[in-house]
Image (cartoon, grey):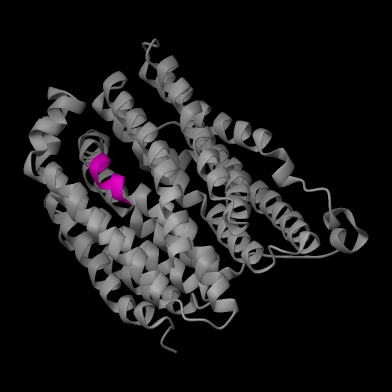
Amino acid sequence: MKDFQKNGLIMVILTTLASGINYICQIGLGRVMSVSSFGVMNSLFSLILVLSVPGTSVNMIAARQIAQCADNADACALTIYQLRRVSLCIGSFLLCGIVLLSIPMGAVLDTTPVMVVLAGLAATLSFFPSLISGVLTGKAAFWAAGIFSLIVPLVKVCGILAAGVVLAEEVKQLVVMSAVAFGNIVAVLIAWRVMFPSAAAQSPDARHSHMSIPGTMLAVNFLYLLLGNGDIFLVVTYFGTEKAGIYSAAMLFGKILFFFTTAVVSVLLPYISKASGKGEGVSPIFRSAFAVTLAVSVVGFLPFNLFPTAYIRLLYGANYIEAAPLVPYSCAVAIFASLLNLELNCFVGMGKERRMLVHLSIALAGLLLLSAVFHASVPALLTVLAAVLGILVAIELPACLRGQAIP
């Protein structure tokens, strides 16, 4: 447990630094772009997260598989080889699909097909950094994994600085999205040796071996990311990009917890995988992660909710002052989405994600139905989303605390 807490602290420190850079990027975007463009960019970022479901699944599989065979270099190399090939195949098909659907998707998100294609390219390129990150956390190389997480945000900063000297809003969007895509390429080039280990992956057996991402894991990640990013999608759908831009300013405060949880689950998943593989209990590890996340929620969100207007004015300026009343709703959604992320990774670590598939499907169907009825205002929509996520967290919690899924 002490080892888990120590490595968790390492990841939290380094991922918090990466998150800080991402927050600066969000504030910079809000400052250099119009409110409407800011809403478009955040809807595209959320689209990237949803499209990167295979990458998220690759990350989970790599962390779980590498954690269980970390002492066997040949087995690790074979796992990397297989997942790299899977990522390339799925990424190629996904990008082709995005190109074909770019016109209707652009109409839904109120942006151009070119921007949708760039978002799809950024998502598919992110598969490979996700694989590298999973390998590093699976090997318990948490310092390396944390430093690696800084690469894409730093390149993104360069893109926003470049966008700041451009006048046309469409060009600003193009520059920033291109930087996100390029950041993933830079990340892969820096960690090239992790992607291509010189071991058993080059053997004839490896070249003829096959691995696929379990359909259940793909579906679970897809549904979770739809729910976890449901706030911006709902606001864009019912109120347009202008309101989405306003809400994006409030959304920044909730994302603080989301990025913190990302650091925690990076450590949580391999530890639970190891413990589950040895037949050991995983509930103490989960309880520790859950308690820390709740504590950070209370301490971190209190000042934002006490003085939301002051924070919005300080960070974004008067153009976004309407976002202040939305900050508590953003924080509530973030708390439940982050706790659900812990539970999801707990089940994946135990290899029992099928239960989550059923519950996430029901939750998404309920959200779509309720949001169609209760969408008179942005707060009403966010209340529905927070309620759905909160109920789901409560349903999954007992099984995670016991360390086993209910059949």
Residue 40: which quarter of the image?
top left
Q: Is residue 326 visible?
A: no
Q: Is residue 33 visible?
A: yes
Q: Quadrant of the N terminus?
A: bottom left
Q: Residue furthest right?
A: 204
Question: What segment carries the magenta color?
Answer: 251-257
At x 55%, y 71%, the residue is: 273
Q: Is residue 256 magenta?
A: yes
Tag count: 0
Tell me: residue 133, above or below residue 159: below
- Nearer to us in this view, 31 or 144: 144
Percent of width and height locating residue 87: 66, 52
Which percent across, then down, holds residue 127? Answer: 60, 47
Residue at position x 71%, y 52% from top?
84
Q: Is residue 36 above or below residue 171?
A: below
Residue 218 is covered by the magenta coloring: no
